[in-house]
Image (cartoon, rainbow, N blue to C red):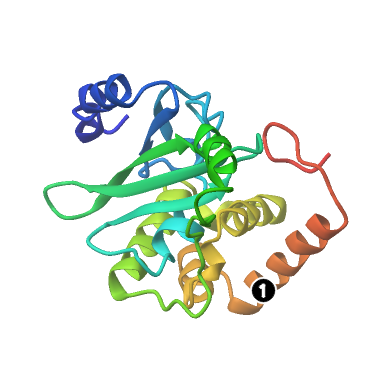
Amino acid sequence: MHPILKAYIPVVNMLIQTFGKNCEIVIHDLTQPKSSVVYVANGTVTGRKEGQSFDHLIRQVLLNKKFKDDCTANYVFEAENGKKVKSSSALIRNPEGEVVGMLCINYDLTVSYLIQERLNDFLPASTPETTSTEDSVPNQDVLTIIDELIDNIIKNTDVGNLKRKDNIEIIRFMDEKGVFLVKGAIDKVAASMGLSKVTIYSYLDEVREKNRKGVAYGEDNIPI
């Protein structure tokens, strides 16, 4: 865990005690994106576990139209366990201004929805605002964060000696996390990996074709 992030653990534990069992808080170390989850308090809301990678960061945080001043608040998504979750996320920077982590608060809305159903006969039903990335244009700060994420994903990797299957795995990981939703990401990835844009597009097409065919991946993200 990045040293700066350790200081947030007491804050996380305090918030969990304040907001109770329906609240889950996750600390991500974005200097190690492939296993970014480094601390989880009350992981029963979404099932987050230490050692997992970041989820929703690009799609629901960085590309959210309300992303401003390094945070996005109160966006709603459906977790893999089917729960409707209200979430707020804030980036954490080091003294040099570089992004090193992210703090996410996830709140289970299940009870709130049940209460709303009981009140629908008396009050007009309301629908929580959901996240939309349509027509959103990443600002320069978002592009810088994406650049840092890409660099962190391939750091300590001898890209010049990677085999084809290794390159494809890196592309698969980035695509799964939404990296290529950001305009200009292809150019950045190509430059960082020492490959042509044509090659990156080819790998990306192969990855997505396998996904369409339902190719399963094992624990090490290798097709099985």
Image: 71 above or below 81: below
Pick the front one: 117 or 151: 117
Could you tell me if residue 169 is visible in this image?
A: yes
**Residue placed at 52% from the left, 32% from the top?**
111
* Left or right of 213 on screen, residue 219: left
Task: Give the residue displayed 79% in from the left and 56% down from the top.
Answer: 211
Quadrant of the rendering where the N terminus is positioned: top left
Residue located at (49% from left, 25% from top): 43
Coordinates of residue 122 in the picture (x, y in percent):
52, 48
| Quadrant that contains the C terminus | top right
- Number of marks: 1
Quadrant of residue 15 in the image? top left
Q: Residue furthest front?
A: 122
Residue 13 in percent (x, y) is at 28, 21
Neighbourhood count class around disc 1 (C-alpha, 10 Å): few under 14, some 14–19, many 20 upward: some
Q: Is residue 56 visible?
A: no
Q: Nearer the viewer, residue 91 or 118?
A: 118
Question: Picture coordinates of residue 165 (x, y %)?
Answer: 71, 51
Q: Is residue 31 above or below residue 132?
A: above
Work out whether 82 lies above or below 135.
above
Task: Left or right? Give the position of 175 relative to 45.
Answer: right
**Quadrant hosting residue 206:** bottom right
Where is residue 190 shown, x and y percent of the image? 53, 70
Q: Relative to 76, does residue 12 appear above or below in the rendering?
A: above
Of 104 and 127, the residue lying toward us = 127
Q: Dot 1: what SS?
A: helix
Residue type for callout 1: Tyr
User: Farthest right residue?
Assistant: 213
Residue position for label 1 = 201
Judging depth in this view, the residue of 173 and 39 nearest the camera is 39
